[in-house]
Image: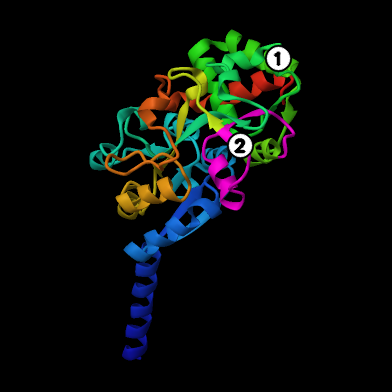
Amino acid sequence: MMRKLLLTLLLSVSSTALAAETLTVYSGRNEKLVGPLLKKFTEKTGIEVKVRYGETPQLAATLLEEGDKTPADVFFAQDAGALGALGNAGRLQALPKATLDKVDARFRSPTGLWVGTSGRARVVAYNTKKVKPADLPKSILGFTDAKWKGRLGWAPTNASFQAFVTALRLLKGDEAATAWLKGIQANEPRVYKNNAAVVEALGRGEIDAGFVNHYYLYAAKKSNAELPVANYFVAAGDPGALVNVAGVGILQGTKQVDNAHKFAAFLLEPEAQTYFSQETYEYPLVKGVKTAEALPSLAKVGSPDLDLSRLDDLRGTVKLLQDTGVL
């Protein structure tokens, strides 16, 4: 009887220890992009990662709805706006100073609630057989010119595009953002489901230029190195030069605080930062990790001065897109 009781207790302790070494992550980052990296985290730490993948805005909405009852310990988001929304709602807890200090202040929460893990620049991708760099305007605002009629492509339902529109609203005002959206609409752009589809259309010569994140070009060129598409960076400081970040935040109420801190710290270690640089062609945010050779430096890109947490007004941006007929 005593032996049976001891065995039961041992099994109970083992089960509790196993559960304590499991981290639940809600990931707005695509499994193909970050799945291998999360496996490396488990291999390095022994902490199992249970992942729920989905679109960043939808996962953020789910976390807000779940509140204190969420099973999530960590939110690994595709953009800063979603993290800002959760922070404003009191759903994130402060990260350790040692983790925050690894990243430049402009790429992390000013209140320490989230930290950027990699940078994602907005660019104008263009077909190199049909357009010369000299033909492209220095500002994203220049694409409302009638000479671009029937030549543009965009993905208005894409979260990164909507984050850019939010930045445009913050930097230039709603009136200017409305004018830009209406101006692009007047040029009859082709609509695509995502950034990848825009780059593919450029490769086919279906459009001459399109608004995307910088790294989609390099993903496409992995399967077709001869793709006649290149990235164009508008002038530094322009709204079209926005550098948003993927980032991580730790949920309030998690019982896995130490393991969650380990996860956030891991994403900023040289191994993970090099993975973002060399495998996904994103910008590493930690000093000492080299940017992919094909990319201009972050300093040269010159992202406009903007608190990325303020990109949280997705609802206002969606309403604007609807009011202008974009959505």
Question: To which residue does mark 2 refer?
Answer: 229
Visible in this render: residue 48?
Answer: no
Quarter of the rendering occupied by the C terminus: top right
Element at badge 1?
A: helix
Q: How many marks?
A: 2
Residue visible at 38% across and 30% down in the picture: 298
Find residue 61 and report its horizontal and vertical position in percent: 56, 38
Q: Is residue 219 magenta?
A: yes
For the point 54% across and 16% down, the residue is 139
> Dot 1, how many residues are within 10 Å of its Cα: few (below 14), some (14-19), or many (20+)?
few
Judge whether 264 appears above or below 156 on screen: below
On whether residue 71 falls in the magenta region, the answer is no
* 278 lies above or below 291: below
> Where residue 174 is drawn, which disc sits there?
none
Residue nearest the viewer, comparing 213 with 250: 213
Q: As rendered, which of 124 and 42 lies closer to the eye?
A: 124
Whether label 2 touches label 1, CB < 8 Å:
no
Quarter of the picture holding the N terminus? bottom left
Q: From this viewpoint, is residue 232 visible?
A: yes
Q: Position of residue 41 (x, y in %)?
A: 38, 59
Q: Is residue 120 left or right of residue 263?
A: right
Image spot of residue 275 (x, y percent): 40, 51
